[in-house]
Amino acid sequence: MAAKTVLNYLERDSVIHKMTGTTKLAFFLLFTFASMITYNTWVLLGLFAVSLVAFRLSHIKYREVRFMMIFMLVFLVLNNLFIFLFDPNQGTTLYGTRHVLFHLFWRYDVTAEQLFYMLNISLKYFVALPVAILFISATNPSEFAASLNSIGISYKVGYSVAIALRYIPDIQRDYHSISQAQQARGVELGKNEHFFARLKNSVNILLPLILTSLNRIDTISNAMELRGFGKNKKRTWYTKRPFARRDFIAIAIGVVLLAISLFVTIRFGRFYNPFVG
């Protein structure tokens, strides 16, 4: 059975895929800045709606990025848990009021302000994740390298990033193959084994995986050196495409979203406070 990979390029016939790598990089940065500078619930909800529309336009299915969604949800739950454990009164400090819903123990009171604050934290994750997944899954690595070079980053750095992105699925497939081989030799990695036993047995996969990776890196390095990579100051790109109307529209939308976020933040503050009339 073929190994399932994550964080890899998924080719589709969509308007998102047809945009240039530079456009997707610019929109990703503008959208990320717009979501980072504000905690206003209404702005975050609007950005979340935009990210869902963009995800729908990409024709990428949920099941194809399910692992990243689940990983994000687990991380989000842990993040909110630790926020509450370390400072259960952060919300009351920010919003200036205190409405206790119920008491847990010691100094831990569950307040409406704290829950609302953690809701906004969660919204920021839900806003950023679909766009981040789109940026990785809808951008050809070579095109991404060309986009980095187009904004002034050295083509050596851009090409290194492109190789790294191409290498992630290879590592996952190698891990899957080595894991299957180890299980065929009697090394138990399934759910029937205890967690710590599975963790210990997983170490048997790491050494072959590291050796395989080092061998592949050496092969790629030798091939690039033989072809004179890095000899000149500039290079051409096969995947670089000219800007089209859709690219200008996407960048304009990103600029408008950032402008709205900045305006609301400056005019009304970073936090929307429903507890003060």
Image: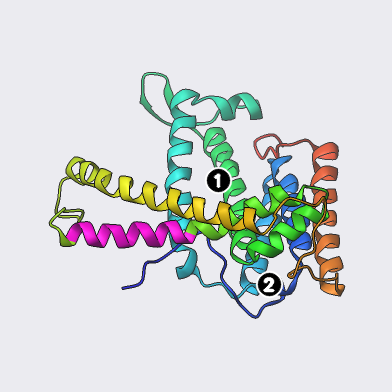
Front residue (pair 29, 217) = 217
Nearest-to-viewer mark from 1 and 2: 2
Per the image, the residue denoted by label 2 is 17
Q: Which amino acid does label 1 sit on?
A: Ser
Q: Which image quadrant is residue 58 in?
A: bottom right
State left or right for residue 99 relative to residue 57: left
**Nearest to N terminus: mark 1 or mark 2:** 2
Q: Where's the C terminus, which quadrant?
A: top right
Image quadrant in which the N terminus is located: bottom left
Q: Percent from the top left, x then y, of residue 77? A: 44, 43
| Residue 272 magenta-highlighted | no
> Few, some or many C-alpha atoms within 10 Å of disc 1 (few <14, some 14-19, many ≥20)?
some
What secondary structure predominates along the stretch shown in magenta?
helix
The quarter of the displayed image where residue 203 is located:
top left
Describe the element under mark 1 as helix, strand or loop: helix
Query: Mark 1 and mark 2: span between their CA atoms?
Result: 28 Å
